[in-house]
Each structure stands twice: as structure tokens, then as C-alpha cells.
Image (tube, rainbow, N blue to C red):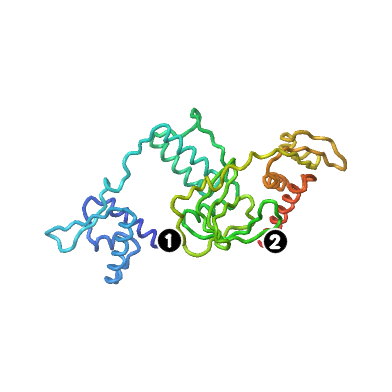
């Protein structure tokens, strides 16, 4: 929808809400910016389309026929347009607050924050300070926002994926049925078109961008599919230790979290960092730039190298 049309529809809604008596089409034509003041036929077509579009999204436009007038009048009754009072039980409000926190690092952060603000303004408490609920989810995977939108819109996506235990990166074309979190990791479940079978993909192994393909509504999710059962519960992650070289007098956060730090040589210290996921460790170490580098184990070192090469490639494309 164009900006001009959006403004016209919004102005029409405001006009019909603000009036105390029904307005004729001619009165609306002169009161609402965006309608053609000279071409009667063009105005009538546009006005009819606008009324239909507003009704389709649930805005109640009433038509009043006055026996003393030739033309009907239009208005939006405020009582039918406004939402009823929202009342939530404490546990319901707490769940909403928890859901908003889930999205705080995703593309829905602004919408979630605005919704909480409106609930609080209406006297609904959504904080979790005294509740039993605790947030243990994160959405730092860059693929998450696009995949979530694709699930919502039933839209096919394509992405490059590195399978577990393999350095090979293959392109996948997937009908995403849903995104599921297990032990802090996110997975997308769907139908792999090339393999003609259902598959589970871990978001942390998606490399590069996730690109939508085709139009929304391109597929349907099979009835009775259990996304959580398909993901299953991965084995409890095994803690490992990485040997990280850290420039002296830098990376105080890493030093604080390291299991041990030893004075090294040539301006570098040796830190022992406990980790379970090489990709997460790689993201952290890569963010420290030239001040830290992984020496061991090899898979963690290679993960850092991949991150740095990917960042270098993106910078070159700008």
C-alpha cells in the first residue's frame, strides 16, 4: 500500500470517527485530503474501494439514509470501533511480559515494547519481578527474524547450511513449518523440497542470508505435525575448554569469565575458556577483533576463522 493511500484511509477513519452526524459522500470528498475534487467518477470509484478495504479489516462504517436527504450519510460509531476494556489475570499478564522479553533482541522488539507500554498505561502489571517465570531464551541468530516471518506468511525460503560434523555447505530450499527452541538453541522445522522429506535445521549452522522465495501462502503445514517432537531433546551439551590467546591489558570480560589465565609471551596471555558450542564461542571471540584468537580445539578455531572471513566478505560487498 502506498504512503498516499495509507494517509487517505487514515484521514477517512479520523473524519468518520470525529463527526457527530453522518456525512455525505460530497462532504467527505471535501473534508478528507487525497480525493479528486474535480473528477466525480474517479472520486466515486476511489471512495467505494476505500470503504470496502476498511470494512475488510474490521472497521465498522455505518450507512444512514435520511428520508429528507437524497444521498446517504456515513459515520463510524465510536463504541463499535474502540476495543473493550482489557482485563488480565496476574498469570496472563506475566506470560505477556515473558513473551515480550523473548522478542527483545528480534525484529519485533519495538512492537512488543509498545504493547507492554499500553498495557501498563491501562493499569495492567506485566513485570516478572515477583513471579515464578524466568526467561531462558535468546534470538541472537541472524536467521531468526526472516525465518519467523516466513513461517508466519507460509513462504518458502532458501539458505546455505552446514551440516553437523561436516565442513560442506549446501543450499537448501525449505517450506518452514515453525521455529522451536531447545536448551537455548533455535531450530527451524519444515519440508526440504530437494530431498522431498521433513527436516530439522539448527539456526546456528545457517551461513549467510535466508532468502524468501515466491509468494506468501505457498504451502500448508500438515495437520497434526508435532514440531517439538521432531526437534526432540538434544543431548545435554558437553563442556569443553578452549585455549585462547589474549593481548595483555585487553578483554577484561573474557579474563573474568575464563577458568584460568596465565601470563604468556610476546604481549599475549593464555586463557582457558569453558564452552559447549563452538559457534557461540566463535561469535564471542570474533567480536573481540585482533585482541583474541583461539588456538585449540581445532573446530572452535575454524569456527572463528569462518566468522571473520564472512565479516570480511560482507565488508567488501558494501
Q: Residue furthest left?
A: 68
Image spot of residue 190 (x, y percent):
53, 55
Q: Residue at the spot x=53%, y=33% of the render?
A: 134
The quadrant in which the C terminus is found is: bottom right
- Disc 2 on helix, strand or loop? helix
273 to 6, vertically: above or below: above
Image spot of residue 242 (x, y percent):
76, 41
The quadrant in which the N terminus is found is: bottom left
Is 291 left, or right, of 73 in this rendering? right
Q: Residue at the spot x=46%, y=56% of the render?
A: 153
Q: Residues within 10 Å of mark 1 (few under 14, many from 20)?
A: few
Count the labels in the image: 2
Per the rendering, the mark at residue 22 is none
Q: Nearer the viewer, residue 208 or 116?
A: 208
Mark 1 or mark 2, whichever is nearer to me: 2
- Disc 1 on helix, strand or loop? helix
Decide which of tag 1 and tag 2 comes sooner along the chain.
1
Image spot of residue 132 (x, y percent):
50, 29
* Marks 1/2: CA–CA distance: 34 Å
Q: Residue at the spot x=40%, y=62% of the render?
A: 4
Q: Quadrant of residue 70?
A: bottom left
CB atoms of marks 1 and 2 within 8 Å: no
Q: Residue furthest right?
A: 265
Q: Residue at the spot x=25%, y=49% of the render?
A: 77
Q: Nearer the viewer, residue 47 or 182?
A: 182
- Residue behind mark 1: 3
Q: Quadrant of residue 160?
A: bottom right
Q: Residues within 10 Å of mark 2 (few under 14, many from 20)?
A: few
Q: Nearer the viewer, residue 215 or 35?
A: 215
- Residue behind mark 2: 316
Is 86 left, or right, of 128 in this rendering? left
Image spot of residue 49 (x, y percent):
31, 64
Amino acid at each position: 500500500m502506498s504512503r498516499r493511500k495509507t494517509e487517505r484511509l487514515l484521514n477517512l477513519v479520523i473524519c468518520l470517527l470525529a463527526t457527530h452526524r453522518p456525512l455525505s459522500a460530497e462532504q467527505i470528498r471535501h473534508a478528507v485530503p487525497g480525493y479528486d475534487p474535480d473528477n466525480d467518477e474517479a472520486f466515486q470509484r476511489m471512495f467505494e474501494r476505500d470503504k470496502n478495504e476498511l470494512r475488510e479489516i474490521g472497521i465498522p462504517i455505518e450507512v444512514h439514509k435520511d428520508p429528507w436527504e437524497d444521498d446517504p450519510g456515513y459515520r463510524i460509531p465510536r463504541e463499535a470501533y474502540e476495543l473493550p476494556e482489557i482485563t488480565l489475570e496476574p498469570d496472563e499478564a506475566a506470560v505477556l511480559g515473558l513473551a515480550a522479553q523473548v522478542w527483545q533482541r528480534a525484529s519485533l522488539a519495538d512492537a512488543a515494547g509498545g504493547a507492554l507500554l499500553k498495557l501498563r498505561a491501562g493499569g495492567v502489571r506485566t513485570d516478572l519481578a515477583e513471579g515464578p517465570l524466568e526467561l531462558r531464551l535468546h534470538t541472537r541468530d541472524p536467521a531468526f527474524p526472516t525465518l519467523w516471518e516466513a513461517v508466519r506468511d507460509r513462504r518458502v525460503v532458501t539458505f546455505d547450511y552446514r551440516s553437523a560434523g561436516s565442513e560442506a555447505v549446501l543450499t537448501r530450499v525449505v517450506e518452514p513449518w515453525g521455529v522451536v527452541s531447545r536448551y537455548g538453541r533455535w531450530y527451524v522445522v519444515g519440508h526440504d523440497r530437494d530431498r522431498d522429506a521433513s527436516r530439522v535445521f539448527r539456526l546456528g549452522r545457517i551461513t549467510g542470508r535466508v532468502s524468501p522465495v515466491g509468494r506468501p501462502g505457498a504451502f500448508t503445514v500438515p495437520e497434526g505435525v508435532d514440531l517439538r517432537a521432531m526437534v526432540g531433546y538434544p543431548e545435554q551439551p558437553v563442556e569443553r575448554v578452549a585455549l585462547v590467546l589474549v593481548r595483555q591489558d585487553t578483554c577484561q570480560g573474557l579474563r573474568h569469565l575464563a577458568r584460568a589465565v596465565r601470563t604468556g609471551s610476546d604481549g599475549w596471555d593464555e586463557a582457558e575458556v569453558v564452552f559447549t558450542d563452538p559457534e557461540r564461542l566463535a561469535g564471542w571471540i570474533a567480536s573481540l577483533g585482533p585482541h583474541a584468537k583461539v588456538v585449540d580445539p581445532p573446530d572452535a578455531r575454524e569456527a572463528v576463522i569462518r566468522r571473520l572471513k564472512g565479516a570480511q566478505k560482507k565488508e567488501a560487498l558494501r
